[in-house]
Image: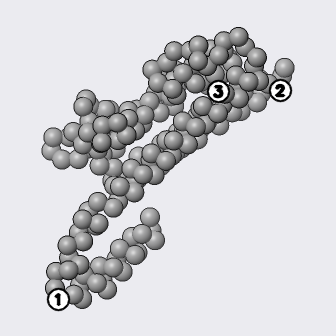
Amino acid sequence: MKIRESKEKEFNEEYLENRKDDTFKNLSLYKNNFNWILLHSLFISSFSYFENFMRSAAKFAEKENNSKIKISDINGKNNIDKYRKYLNLICKIENAENQSNNWIKLMGFNSVRNCIIHEYGIVKKPIKIMSEYNIYFGPSCNMIRMRNIDFLVDFVEIAINYMDKINEEYKTKTSQN
């Protein structure tokens, strides 16, 4: 972020302020849109990593567990919820319980992710976490424009904490057997 901001400042000083014509002044599109596009991309990539962890953890547990109940036998609100349920119900991982604070927060982040991925950033119904981080765009508050890096930082911290707890508990349970 700091490197990008210094390059933007350098660009503004060297090109925009020293040009007599309007050639580079039309590049305000970059200045106004790059930050939120970058944050959206980083968030989607980070969330994909979290999804992959949940899938990998459930698949590993399914293989190691030799349970007759498979991930495909579990119903969930989405794939991540299905993986969580498998870890919680079949593998008895208490940290994968659906009422944990981390899981509830992660599902708020998931709602934002779904709006960005499936609805092109258009919000069809209010999402509590969006107002907490002020990531609504425009007076109608029906579009996502992430400009608050704390949203991304908090997601990463919560996701890592959640993944660590599941991983540690799974290791503890399997080492006891």
Residue 20 has which mark? 1
Q: Nearer the viewer, residue 92 or 68?
A: 68
Q: Would you say residue 62 is visible in this rendering?
A: yes
What amino acid type is highlighted by mark number 2? Answer: Ser
Residue plotted at (42% across, 69% down): 4
Residue plotted at (29% across, 66% down): 30
Residue 52 has which mark? none
- The x and y percentages for residue 2 are 45, 68
Circle nearer the viewer, 2 or 1: 1
Which element is circle 1 on? loop
Q: Nearer the viewer, residue 170 or 19?
A: 19
* Residue located beneath label 2 in the image: 175
In three-dimensional space, the C-alpha distance between marks 2 and 1, rounded to whole angstroms, equals 71 Å
Which element is circle 2 on? helix
Pointer 1 with pointer 3, Cβ within 8 A: no
Q: Tell which circle, 2 or 3, labels the residue nearer the N-terminal end.
A: 3
Residue plotted at (71% across, 10% down): 68
Q: Would residue 33 appear left or right of 58 to someone viewing this image?
A: left
Q: Neighbour class for label 2 at 10 Å: few (<14), some, many (≥20)?
A: few
In three-dimensional space, the C-alpha distance between marks 2 and 3, rounded to whole angstroms, equals 17 Å
Q: Would you say residue 88 is visible in this rendering?
A: no
